Every structure is written in C-alpha cells, then in structure tokens.
Image (cartoon, rainbow, N blue to C red):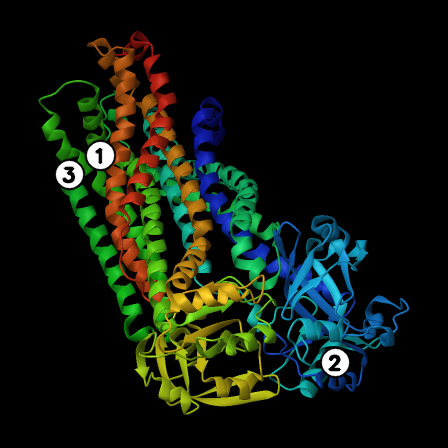
Amino acid sequence: MFRLMHLRQLRRQPLRATLAVVALGAGAAITVATGLFLTSIDESIRDVLRELSGPAPLRVVGPLDRAGLDASVTEQVSGVDGVEAAVPAVHAVAVAERRDGSQVHLLAVGVDCRVEALIGPFGCDQRSLDPRRPDAPVLISASLKRWLGDRAVIRTDTGRVPLGNAAVNDTLDETNQGRVAVYELATAQRLFGRSDRLDAVYVQPERGADLERLRSRIAGAVGDWNYVLKRDELAPWMELNGPILPLLGFAGLLALGLSGLLVYNIVALSLAERRRDLAVAGAIGTGQGTITSGILIEAGLLGLAGGVLGAVAGIWVARLLVDASSGVLFEQSIGLRPTVHVSVWMLVLGVVLGGVTGVIAAVVPARRARRLDLAAELHGRAVQIEDAPRRALVRLILLVAAGGLALLGSHVAQRNGALEPWQSSLGSLSIVLTSLFLLAAVGAAAPLLLRILLHPLRATAGPLRVAVSNLASRPRRTSVMAATVGASVALACVLGAVIPAIRGTTETDLGKAAGGRVWVSTLPMNNAGASARPSPRVLAALESMPGVARVDPNRGVSIGDDLGGFGVYASVWTGDPPFRRVAGEVSAEALDRGDALIGTSAARSRGVRPGSRLRIPTPNGFVGVRVAGIWATSNDNGYRVSVSPRVFGDLFGEELAENLWLVPERGVSADELARRVEAAQLDPDLYVRTPEEASAQLASEVGDQVAPFWMLQRLLLFVALVGSLSTLLLVGVQRRRELGVLGAVGFGPGGLARMTIAEAIAAALVGAVLGVAASIGLFEALRNASAVAVGIRPPFGFDAIAALVATTLGLGVVTAGALFPAWRTSRMQIVEAIRDE
C-alpha cells in the first residue's frame, strides 16, 4: 500500500518532491551552517593549540590571556615528579606589514633552547641568542615570506621591527595556515610587552607517566589560579561567548521553522489533490492508521532527503559565514583565521532535523486525511473546507496575545539589570517565543487583510480582483507565502534597527567615557588583542607634549576563572559616570577607595552584589576586591570589572596600555590637541581621534560584526523564493479545473499568467507590510534580550530605508518565483482541464 499510494506518487510528481526537498534543505542548510560556524571556530583554535604543543600532552597557562604566568612557574613544573621537561613559551598576536601597507595578523611565538625537548636537538646555543639585538632574529613560514616580500616589518609593542634577516622554515606553513613567527624567548618578552612573564609552559612527561596523576600533581604545584590543560583544551578566557551565539542559534531555528511551514503547505496541497485516491484506499479497506503512517513516512523521507541536501549546502554556507566574520571577530583578537571544520555529528544532526521537521509538518495534513468523507469524495461532491473568517480572527488574536505575553516576559527578564540567573534563561526563551508567535501572526493576518482589501476591488474586474479573491478564500496557502516573506523582511528591519542602535549606544557611552579627552593608539578602536600597542617611547613623548595636562593609559586584561571569562580594566573618567547605575555606589570616589565597579553580566554569573568581595585571579594568586556598585556597561558584553589604576597596578603590574587618553590643558581644545599630536609624527602607526571621531569609528567597527546576520537574511530570502515557487506551482495543479473555467469564460493565457503573478505579489506585499509591523515587536524583544546578553538595553529605533529595501527585495524575489508557475498556467489546455465539468 505504501508503495502504491506514496512511493509511486513521488515518482509521478517529481516537481512536488523536489520542492519539498529544497524547502527543507534550505532551512536545514542555515541550521547546519550556524552549527558548523561555531564548531569551526572552536576546532580552528584547537588545531593551532595542537600544532603549538607538538608532542607535549599538557600545558600550563595562567588566568590572563596575556602574560598570565609568573616566571617561577617553569621551575615549579620542572620540580614535579614525573616531568621530564618544562618548556616556557610566549604567545602573542602580532601584525605583519608589507611595503605597500597591507597587513596580516599572525601568531608570534617565543621559545628558548629548552624547546629541543619537544622537537629534538637542532644545535641550539642559548649564548648566541642575544635578546637585545635591534634586528630581532626571527623564523617565519615560507608562505608568509612569499606574501610579505621585501622590506616588510612586524609591528610590536616597542615599534616596528624589520624582517630583512628573517629565516624561513617550510614546516611552519602547517601552523595557523603559515601565519606564524618564532622568536627567541627573551626577545619575544621584550618585543611583546611580557616583561619576565610567560603565556604557557609545555610539559613533556617522563616515559610511562600517568597523565591524569601528573596533571593533578602539577596543578597542586602551580596553584589553583593557574590551569593545567590538555594539548587542545581551551583556557577559560578562550571560550566563545557574547551575543553572536544566541543570535545565530535563533536565526537557524527561524529558518528551520519556515521550512517546516513550507513543507506543511506542500503536503497539504498534495493531499488535497490526492483526496480521491485516499478515499478509494479507504473504501477498499485500508485502515486510517495505515493512511496516516504512510503520509508521515512519505514526509519523513522527503525530510531526510532535504536534510542531506541541507547538510551538504550547509558546508558552503558555513564557509560564507566564516569568511564574513573571521577578520573582524577573530584575526584581530587572537591572530587566527578560522577554517571550516566539517563535523560528522553536525551533518547527521542536519539530516535528522530535516526528517523530524518533515514528519512534524505532515501531522496536521495527515489528521485531516483521516477525516475524509468517503462517499462525498467518491461521488465528487466534496469541497475542501478552509477556515472561516471568524475562526481565523480568533486564531490571530490568540497568536498576538501569546506574542505579547512573550514580549512581556522579555521585559521582565531585563528588569533591575537582569542580575538574577533565571532572568537569563527567561530572556532567551522570550525572544524565541516572541519571534515564533509574531511571525505566525503575520501568516494568520494576511488572509484577513486581503479580505478587507477585496471590498474596494469588487467594482473592478480582471486578474487583480480574481487573484486577491483567491488568496482571501485560501487562507492556508496564503498564510505560508506571507509568513515566509514577512519573516525575511522582519529580520532585515530588525538588523536595520540594530546597527543604528549599536552605533548610537557606542557613540553615547564612549562620548561620556571620553569626557573631552583625545584618543591615541597604534591599533584600531575595536582591536585590543594585537601586541602592537603604544610604546613607552610614545607615552613619554605625549606626557611631555605642550598642551597635554595628563595622559590616562587605558590598561586592561582578559581573565578566566572556573565560571568563565571577564575583563579587568583600569578606569578613569571626568564628570559623571559613563554608564547607568544599576545597584550600589557608582562613582570615581569608590574606585579611589580601592573598590570595584562591575557589569551586570559579571554580577549575575558570579552572584556578586554591592558589598561583596570578588575573587580576581592574578599571576601570583587570588586577590579579593570589594564591589562598590553595578553599572550597565556593554564592555566585554557586561563581563567587565573596573578598578582604579592604582589597584590595577597592584594586581597585574605595569601592563602596557591598549590606548591612551590625553587630557587637554585649560584653553586647549580637543581638536587643537589632536592636530598637535598628528603634527609631531611620533609613530607611523599612530591613530589620533577627537572624542567625536573616536565614537564614530568604534561604532562603525562594532557594526561590522553583524555581517553574518545580513548573510542569513539573504538566505531567508531564498527560502521565500522556494515558498512562493512551490505554493504557486502546486496551487496551479490543484486548481486546474478552476483555471480551466476561467479560461473558458474569457481569461486568455496572458490573463491567467497575470493573475498568477498578481497572487504572488499581493501575498508578498501583505506579508512584507505585516513583517515590518512584526519587526517592531521583535526589535523590542531583542532590546530586552540585549540587556541580558551584552549588559545594555539599546535605544529604540526604526530604519525606514532598510524596511523599504527589504520589502522591495522580497517582492522582487517572489515575483521571480512566480514567473515559471505563471508560464505553466498560461500554457494550460482548457479543454482537458474542464473535461469532467
């Protein structure tokens, strides 16, 4: 029975099967791509860690992302029973520059002759390696040498270092795609601001040593503020966090949900066409369970095929996402250009999700097939019953109410700074539910809105009136077409509003933090990871420059503990605090007393409140700092601890500043001081920005981080194309008699084609308008979720240009999808279509 009723039907209608597979494949591709994107970042980091570790199965790192180990750790590890060798190392993110000014971020490594314990003896003579040499001997990969050419330099914390005497090693091409430079240990410490501290100590155990026991003994020797990790294990401050993770997951779920709606529509239309066949099967004794299971299995097979297609396409989409985000998010911060790592489990998950989505989408059509009136169907008197307007209105009201409740939940999640752990979970759940309910409401409202628009068209004739009438009388398929377009337009509107909100918040916060000071650095605003910071020479020159009353170095470190990563920064400002107070005392006087101010995310994750003591790990142990207050800062996504420069120096020593703030003398404007610094030409890489320029540049750089989401929005437009194409093609098959009658009473081929295109445009236009309306609720939910995820609630905004562009693109895509169904409709043979009338 399954072979006759379903497998044969798939062979007889390959177009329907193909559309269902493509619809599910599109959604599965986005879902798989987001998963592969995240796993690729993780695996790319682990690959580099394995390459650096070589044969060493263990490594020791400190609690800081930069120079986190005290120099004494090497001897402490060497003295542990079972350790054959302990190899100290420096890891830094450097910037290499060609003669034409083009740059590449790379990983700079510092080792000494003790590295022979890992890679074997090569005649290393420590006495011949003078760390004071200005030309700084360096070993680089062959591929990097070819790219750099002649007269290249590496930018360091001491300035530019020529690469004219660089030695070349082909085997380094296998490490970090060749983006690596190896220095002598003391030289690397000098060039990259490590003083006498280290970034890692690699451990070579004695032959036959038990690694787990050895790991435990080393941990006891180096202190619990340091970490003993396996070769490819990530340190706490290396873990991925921030808003990109939940937003990517949300986009994947949204795409998969839209694909399910498309498959539901395809299955429902297909079953409507096969009602007589199902009635005959029931009349000859086929049980309802057999019919239902056959429908579900058929949809499941289509879903599995779509999952396979989506898994393959997801690899390509993941590569696009990695390329769109790697430069901004990863190269500048960790010196790594990620590559796509294909995870078998992610591909299997894509296939499974496709099959499960197909089955779920077919449940409702299968239940309807169980309730067929066999006698009416066999006599040709059955009429497909669509939802009555009253019932559709009730469903719309329920969906809007549910979306409103979810939106209210997102508001509760961000109240009082979202300091409670349950608020984080509520915020994530609320934004997903708000999106699902409001986008479903878009589909439910579309037929009702078209029914209202039908009244002004009653006095007219032609394809437009017939098209709108058809859409209003068939709410199910109309809902799916409108929802697919509406979701894409809504996402574009949200992104269009997010970017101005990010820029506005960034400009406002940085403007307050600047307090009229001039920003100076050798790195871009949003790149503090590279070791090419302002040198002590530049700092000294600025302190003695006429017109400079004071130089405030901006010093900070990223730290990891058992609860994850956070940042600790020396904070100085003039005037009112730059961020909104959430709890406790937020003032410069609190910092001067030796207290700390923390962001909401850090307070929530660690259960800290005003008056509590926060344990901060340092290279020499834990230090308790009293928390004076909590404020709403977006720095480090709310995971930032601010202390005074004095306390910061006590904790971490004289860390090099990421950038410098120059306080003008009385009577000297910020613009005038900026011109003086630029005219002095203290460093060829020096950036000088007034407060307004600094705010605008940082806002622009932060806005670039949403590039992956624009790509996902374009992929959702493709889903809309598949939805319109599949719906119109299947409707054309189902309505052959209706279209034949229209042709017989005077609709020519051109009229039938125009009617088909008009249906697509009308459904898309209504869906786009409703999507714009739904985006307001989505953006509000996203604002509330941002207070939980990144520590601030950005101001509300709406970008009319983005809404107009998204609507235009949506209409264009749907119109393109309607051209082929319109062409097929125009070529329909009228006599054959109405032969049974």
Distance Cα–Cα, label 2 vs label 3? 73 Å
Please state if 113 lies on the left or on the right of 472 as rendered.
right
Along the viewing direction, whichever of 646 and 225 lies nearer the viewer: 646
Q: Is residue 831 above or below residue 466?
A: above
The label on residue 386 is 1
Disc 2 vs disc 3: which is toward the camera? 2
Across and down, in percent, residue 213 comes to: 73, 81
Circles 1 and 3 in contact, beta carbons < 8 Å? no
Q: Which residue is mark 2?
A: 214
Q: Quadrant of residue 682?
A: bottom right
Please state if 180 lies on the left or on the right of 440 as rendered.
right
Distance Cα–Cα, label 2 vs label 1? 71 Å
Across and down, in percent, residue 564 comes to: 52, 74
Q: Amino acid at mark 3?
A: Pro
Please state if 175 lies on the left or on the right of 657 as rendered.
right
Across and down, in percent, residue 731 comes to: 32, 26
Element type at mark 1:
loop
Q: Is residue 802 above or below residue 784?
A: above
